[in-house]
Image: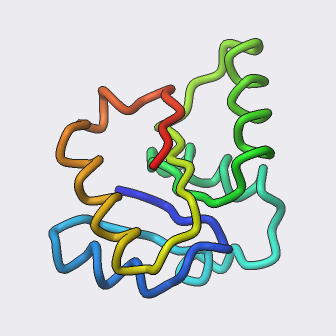
Amino acid sequence: MQVNDEDVDILLKPLLGAKGYSVITPLDEKMLSKSDREQFEYAIKLGCTFLTHNRVYYENLFTEFIKENKEHSGIIIATRKNVYELARRVARLLEFYTEDSIKNKLLYI
């Protein structure tokens, strides 16, 4: 399961859903306007990998989690692309990672 950051196009959800992936958006979970950290901690609580375009903030947060020995279900940082290209890249990445193998990782697409 994957949670998308607020700045990720919500069209990604049905595109990945069509490929068999479960996606949750901040809109679905009534998390719009929550801080990045709150959204990330919510994804951790759900056991979800987190997808974002916000590279700098999540690289720093990832570093904090390493220093504090905190666990998370993975972070995927994506460059801003056409949503169809983004869906293709996310699906391709997820073909190679299981929930366990993406845990505590920071990945870029």
State whether residue 97 is above or below residue 80.
Answer: above
Residue at 81 percent across and 76 percent down: it is 33
Q: Give the color scheme: rainbow, by chain, secondary structure or one colour.
A: rainbow
Using the image as rendered, state which of residue 80 and residue 13 is in the foreground: 80
Residue 31: quadrant of the picture:
bottom right
State whether residue 76 is above or below residue 72.
Answer: below
State whether residue 57 is above or below residue 84.
Answer: above
Residue 18 x/y as whole percent: 18, 80
- How many labels, in total? 0
Residue at 66 percent across and 73 percent down: it is 6
Instruction: Locate the N terminus and report the quarter of the image it occupies.
Output: bottom left
Residue 46 x/y as whole percent: 49, 51
Tell me if 63 is positioned left or right of 35 in this view.
Answer: left
Residue at 50 percent across and 47 percent down: it is 76
Using the image as rendered, state which of residue 32 and residue 101 is in the foreground: 101
Residue 94 x/y as whole percent: 26, 48
Residue 58: quadrant of the picture:
top right
State whether residue 74 is above or below residue 52.
Answer: above
Residue 37 x/y as whole percent: 78, 50
Residue at 20 percent across and 38 percent down: it is 96
